[in-house]
Amino acid sequence: MLRRVLLAASASDRVRRVISSAPVTRNVVARFVAGDTSDDALAVTRRLLDDGLLVTLDYLGEDAVDPQRAAAVTDEYVRLLGALAAAGLSGGGRAEASVKPTAVGLDLAEHGEKRARENIARICAAAREAGTTVTLDMEENSRVEPTLRILGQLRPEFPDLGCVVQSYLRRGPQDCRALAVAGSRVRLCKGAYNAAPGVAFTSRAEVDRSYARCLRVLLAGPGYPMLATHDPRLIRIAAASGRPAGSFEYQMLYGIRPQEQLRLAGGGARVRVYVPYGSDWYGYLVRRLAERPANLLFFLRSLASRG
């Protein structure tokens, strides 16, 4: 029930206005979002890399409503990757980019999938020039198939292009089996969108069991799994798999369990922090709260301490 309420709130303009205008909100958001600009993102990236962590950067914004907006988001990623390279932060994939296909044109009324593919190819080319990679974020269930088509079309030219599988979708294990091939990069997350019960698991326990099934498929395969979870149980399953530490990575959100990130990295694990930046932070934040009740409790305590 709480998850459904939060996901509904993520799409509500009225709730967005109330939360975004609250005096204490902006200070709290700074714990979870690097800032509004690429300079803010670079500063956070530098600090995390100095701490022995890896980074993936997400320029916040989705559902581009016109080609100009999609092109502007693409340009921002290209500039970001150039700035990372110039600062010496991207080599060897230490800092990479995460891109939502809807942010670069997938939902445009005319030729949306083609426009998104072309824009993502531009970003991938900039990433290759910077010595790093790109991961395609996965969005609502209706966007899964076009995102996978784009992935398949671009991987011959950009074989290190990564993608996401969401364990809340019933198709998750099947997608993992199809994607867990040599050279592939697959990020496994639980997912934070609404979907019909026939398409998605509705209980936390079912989503967790699906995640564990997907995790085992990826860890048994020849690809490079990227396990996006803060759940200690799932981290223990991965750690006990016998997979060499350098052959997969954990991914965690900026501002969530930072000490655990450092602990895992200090023990020799590869840990990548998902760092969002940009002014369009509302939808991202509310979906992160919906993914895990502990995130919501952390956020509410932060609001109380700032109030």
Image (tube, rainbow, N blue to C red):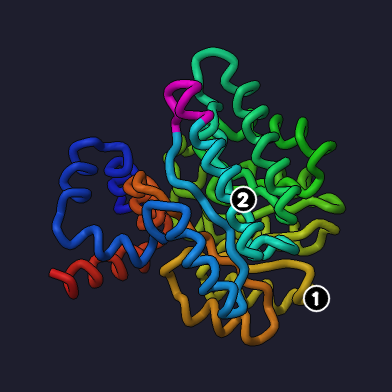
Q: CA distance from mark 1 to mark 2?
A: 29 Å
Element assignment for label 1: loop
Residue 7, quarter of the rendered image: top left
Image location of residue 237, percent across then percent down: 66, 73
Is 247 located above or below residue 14 in the figure? below
Is 166 located above or below residue 275 in the figure? above
Residue type highlighted by circle 1: Pro
Left or right: where does residue 180 sit relative to residue 84? right
Identify which residue is drawn at 17% across, 62% down. 24
Q: Nearer the viewer, residue 75 or 5?
A: 75
Asked whether 68 falls inside the magenta stretch, the response is yes
Asked whether 240 falls inside the magenta stretch, the response is no
Earlier in the chain: of badge 1 and badge 2, it is 2
Screen quadrant of the C terminus: bottom left
Per the image, the residue denoted by label 1 is: 244
Image location of residue 34, percent across then percent down: 41, 61
Per the image, the residue denoted by label 2 is: 81
Residue 292, quarter of the rendered image: bottom left
Element assignment for label 2: helix
Q: Nearer the viewer, residue 147 or 131?
A: 131
Is 73 located above or below residue 245 in the figure? above
Assess disc 2: are there few (<14), some (14-19) or many (≥20) residues with their C-alpha within 10 Å of its C-alpha. Answer: many
Identify which residue is drawn at 29% across, 68% down. 297
Q: Nearer the viewer, residue 292 or 305?
A: 305
Residue type highlighted by circle 2: Leu
Total numbered badges shown on the rendered structure: 2
Magenta region, residue range: 63-71
